[in-house]
Image: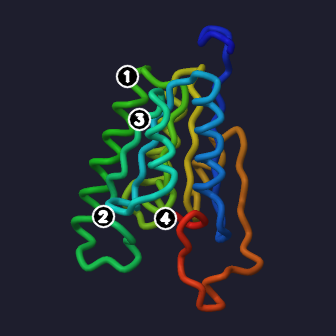
């Protein structure tokens, strides 16, 4: 593993309407942890859900996991609370980056928050440009990545939905979606 002074950190964005954005990001996070990197995962939407990814992360002593969201915000009954929660989570994200404790940070579903106008794409992009350490890797997931975030990223992948089990009345499946 390259030392921080010899590493070029990359910013990955996983966006689009298809399934697999978070799953792909978690795969990268587990890969990094497998190489001994210190990883921090912060989830903006999923809150109290029990997920296989979080259970798996507990097997690693070098992954710190925060599932802090208020749940599925597209069905919100209290948008003011969702905005407040998202801003608090964003403050935690910035603090984790500034701590320089982590080699990789994953901001799961942050793109939804910028899409809803709760955290501007320009604010996110400016933070990445001005404050992300050169050696730190960063992953941002969620539909509707802001153009400013796409511009500052090194790698952007758009997931496209062709077909989804939900369309055939198959509910979210344990071990597949969570």
Instruction: Give left or right: position of 34 versus 110.
Output: right
Name the residue carrying label 2: 70
Q: Are marks 2 and 1 in contact (CB under 8 Å)?
A: no
Give the quadrant of residue 153: top right
Mark 3: which secondary structure?
A: strand
Mark 2 or 4, which is nearer the eye?
A: 2
Position of residue 168 relative to residue 158, above or below, is below
Name the residue carrying label 4: 115
Name the residue carrying label 3: 64
Q: Reading the chain from its start, which is encountered first: label 3 or label 4? A: 3
Q: Reading the chain from its start, which is encountered first: label 4 or label 1? A: 1
Q: Quick one: 174 or 23, which is closer to the camera?
A: 174
Within-10-Å neighbours for mark 4: few <14, some 14–19, many 20+ = some
Mark 2: which secondary structure?
A: loop
Give the quadrant of residue 117: bottom left
Mark 1: which secondary structure?
A: helix
**How far apart in space, not on screen, are marks 2 and 4 (Cα)?**
16 Å
Residue plotted at (40% across, 41% down): 65
Where in the figure is residue 37, as x and y percent of width and height?
56, 23
Viewport quadrant of the N terminus: top right
Name the residue carrying label 1: 99
Where in the figure is residue 143, as x and y percent of width and height?
58, 64
**How far apart in space, not on screen, are marks 1 and 3 (Cα)?**
13 Å
Residue plotted at (48% across, 46% down): 107
**How far apart in space, not on screen, are marks 4 and 1 (Cα)?**
27 Å
Where in the figure is residue 100, as x and y percent of width and height?
43, 20
Mark 4 or 1, which is nearer the eye?
A: 1
Mark 2 or 3, which is nearer the eye?
A: 3
Residue plotted at (44% across, 45% down): 123
Mark 3 or 4, which is nearer the eye?
A: 3
Q: Reading the chain from its start, which is encountered first: label 1 or label 3? A: 3
Within-10-Å neighbours for mark 1: few <14, some 14–19, many 20+ = few
């Amino acid at each position: 593993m390259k030392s921080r002074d010899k590493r070029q950190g990359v910013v990955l964005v996983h966006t689009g309407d298809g399934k697999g954005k978070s799953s792909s990001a978690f795969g990268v996070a587990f890969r990094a942890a497998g190489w001994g990197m210190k990883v921090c995962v912060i989830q903006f939407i999923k809150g109290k859900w029990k997920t296989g990814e979080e259970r798996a992360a507990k097997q690693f002593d070098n992954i710190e996991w925060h599932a802090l969201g208020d749940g599925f915000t597209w069905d919100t009954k209290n948008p003011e609370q969702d905005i407040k929660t998202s801003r608090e989570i964003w403050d935690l994200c910035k603090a984790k980056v500034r701590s320089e404790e982590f080699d990789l940070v994953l901001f799961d579903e942050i793109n939804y928050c910028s899409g809803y106008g709760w955290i501007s794409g320009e604010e996110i992009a400016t933070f990445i440009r001005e404050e992300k350490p050169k050696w730190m890797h960063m992953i941002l997931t969620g539909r509707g990545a802001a153009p400013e975030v796409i511009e500052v990223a090194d790698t952007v992948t758009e997931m496209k939905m062709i077909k989804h089990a939900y369309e055939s009345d198959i509910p979210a499946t344990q071990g597949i979606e969570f």
